[in-house]
Structure formats: C-alpha cells, structure tokens
C-alpha cells in the first residue's frame, strides 16, 4: 500500500465528498523542512524549534535564531508554517532553562512555563521568529506549548502581538486546555492538539514508559473525548463572535490513517505529521466521506478501550487503514 499511496500523493487531503483536510508536516530542522516540501507537504503544522537550543549551554543569539528559522521558512514560500516556541523541560531538558532535579519533570517547569522562571528567552525567540517572517514570504502562525490556563494563552497572545506576529495560537496538550478551549480561543486564533502529551496527561501515563503503552495510546476514548471537547469549544467561541478558529492535530496520532479518519470525524480541521505519513493518510481520507468519518468517530468514542476502539474502526474501514 505505502509505495503506491506515496506515488499518488498530490499534496492535498480531501475526503470522497470533496471536504478539504489540509495535510501539513511536522519538522524539526531545516533539512526536515526541505524533505517535507519535497514530499508535497502544503505547509508546516508543527515546527519544533528545540533544534536551535538543544546541546548548548547558553541561549542562541537572536541573529543565529533568525538564520535557522529563515532556512526553514524559505522551504515553504507563500505557505503556512506553524512555529512552536521553545518546549524545554520534561523529555527535552535544557541546562540554561530547566531544573533537572525536579521530582516529576513532566509535571514541572516545561514549555511556556519557563517564561516565568527565566524571563526573556521567549520574548527574544518571538523577536527572531518575526524577523525570519519578514525575511521570507511564508505565512507564520506562532504557538506556545504546554499551556494550562486561559490567562497563559492571553499573555502569550500579547507577547506575540508585541513582537509583530499576527496569528497567535496555543497547543492543547493538557486536559485543562482541552476543557477551557472555548475561553482560550477568545484570546488566540487557533489551537493545535498535541496528542502525545494530551494522551500522557489525560491517562496519567508517562509517555516515556513503554510498559504503559496500552494506556499511553491516543485511541483511548478518554483522549478522543478531550479532542471532541476541544472542537466543541472552538465552535462555541465562534458562535460567541470570535472569528474562524482552526483546530489542528500535530501529535503522532495524525499519522495513523484510521485514527486520522476519526480525528476528522470529531471535527478536527487540519492534520500535521511526519512527512512519511502523509501519503497513507491522504489515501485513506480519499476513501471516506464526512458522514462516514463522523459515524466512525462515534463508534470509537463509545468503546471501552483503545484497543477496541482501533479494532472497531479498522474493521469498518477495511483494508485501507
Ligand atoms: C505532542 O505533545 O503531541 C507534540 C506534538 O509535542 P511534542 O511531541 O514535541 O511534545
Ligand atoms: Mg508536546
């Protein structure tokens, strides 16, 4: 399947009834960005900026950051690139920013939280992202990781605006962000579901522990319900007068073809994944219409376990996924 699907990929995600589901790439380096563009990705749904910071003992200068971000944006002229600000801590420790002696690093100072403990790094990064945007013609969206409260989303939006960045958003990777998505989306224009962490935090199961893989599975109906809640929150914000609010997924879940169908059925608008997953996801999306995806999402969400949810959906989708 994969070789045939890959050769047929034309860069678009579209259901059999014509519903468009933009398929974007997760990238972590300038080289990744070129690979993703060559694979036909129509943009970047998650640029992990840690590559610029990891393995160093001090913060890279604004100039260095501008150079690196520009190299990535240049691979996507005129296209959307969602730049995530630094997600240090937990599985991505950084000596100058995070405390490795925390008793529970996944629940500690990570992501956006480092702006409180070490102010300045985030503002300088936003400045570098804005300068890179000016140097290219990519459409930059900027988002913060590990947001847990509406006030954090509001404060991040203000920082992005102060740097001259026009499209602020946040990741939904904590249950608190999922259940307050309606409030959060009054302050930011989009959310991106990080299903890797959202699964870890919803299931209270460490993503680094292979022995918890059964719990740490994005097919868990509890995780699917968090996603549905987030989509409903976005609709509520829109109905209360916010403009259009995009809900994307940028965790590994988006690259599982059967799960991608469920995510679309739950109301997710865009899917972002590592480029090698794009063709297989595009192929399965072409095989279903929106009503079928919605019915399959309903089937999945009613199951008692991740395993049964995946099996039930795969059985109905047949050989495609
Ligand atoms: C996620 O948590 O799903 C995500 C996309 O971010 P990361 O894997 O970098 O934590
Ligand atoms: Mg994450």
Image (spheres, rainbow, N blue to C red):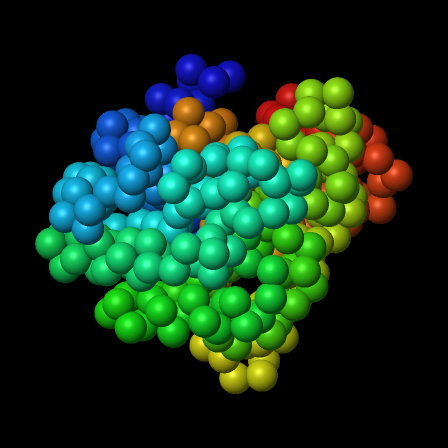
Residue 239, given in percent of the width and then of the height, sits at: 58, 80
Report if residue 260 is visible in the image.
no
> If the image is split into quadrants, where does the C terminus sit?
top right
Q: Of 179 and 163, which appears nearest the observer? A: 163
Furthest residue toward bottom? 241
Residue 220, given in percent of the width and then of the height, sits at: 76, 39
Q: How many marks?
A: 0
Residue located at (38% from left, 74% from top) = 158
Residue located at (52% from left, 67% from top) = 152
Residue 112, given in percent of the width and then of the height, sits at: 48, 55
Residue located at (48% from left, 35% from top) = 92
Q: Could you tell whether 132 is left or right of 141 in the image? A: left
Residue 237, given in percent of the width and then of the height, sits at: 58, 76
Residue located at (49% from left, 49% from top) = 111
Q: Could you tell whether 291 is left or right of 52 in the image? A: right
Q: Of 270 and 11, which appears nearest the observer? A: 270
Q: Is residue 197 above or below residue 56?
A: below
Q: Of 92 and 29, which appears nearest the observer? A: 92
């Amino acid at each position: 399947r994969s070789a045939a699907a890959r050769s047929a990929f034309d860069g678009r995600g579209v259901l059999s009834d014509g519903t468009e589901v933009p398929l974007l790439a997760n990238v972590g380096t300038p080289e990744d960005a070129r690979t993703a563009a060559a694979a036909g990705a129509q943009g970047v749904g998650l640029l992990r900026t840690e590559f610029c910071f990891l393995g160093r003992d001090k913060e890279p200068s604004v100039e260095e950051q501008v150079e690196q971000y520009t190299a990535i944006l240049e691979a996507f002229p005129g296209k959307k690139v969602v730049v995530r600000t630094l997600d240090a801590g937990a599985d991505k420790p950084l000596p100058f920013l995070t405390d490795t002696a925390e008793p529970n690093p996944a629940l500690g100072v990570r992501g956006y939280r480092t702006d409180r403990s070490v102010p300045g790094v985030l503002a300088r990064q936003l400045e570098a992202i804005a300068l890179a945007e000016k140097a290219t013609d990519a459409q930059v969206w900027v988002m913060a990781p590990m947001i847990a409260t509406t006030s954090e989303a509001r404060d991040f939006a203000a920082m992005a605006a102060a740097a001259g960045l026009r499209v602020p958003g946040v990741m939904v990777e904590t249950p608190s962000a999922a259940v307050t998505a309606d409030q959060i989306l009054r302050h930011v224009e989009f959310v991106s579901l990080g299903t890797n962490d959202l699964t870890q935090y919803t299931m209270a199961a460490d993503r680094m522990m292979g022995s918890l893989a059964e719990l740490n599975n994005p097919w868990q109906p509890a995780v699917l319900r968090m996603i549905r809640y987030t989509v409903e929150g976005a609709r509520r914000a829109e109905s209360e007068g916010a403009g259009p609010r995009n809900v994307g997924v940028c965790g590994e879940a988006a690259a599982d073809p059967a799960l991608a169908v469920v995510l679309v059925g739950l109301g997710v608008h865009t899917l972002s994944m590592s480029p090698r997953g794009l063709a297989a996801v595009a192929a399965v999306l072409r095989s279903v219409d929106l009503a079928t995806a919605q019915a399959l999402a309903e089937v999945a969400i009613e199951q008692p376990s991740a395993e049964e949810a995946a099996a039930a959906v795969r059985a109905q989708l047949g050989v495609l996924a």
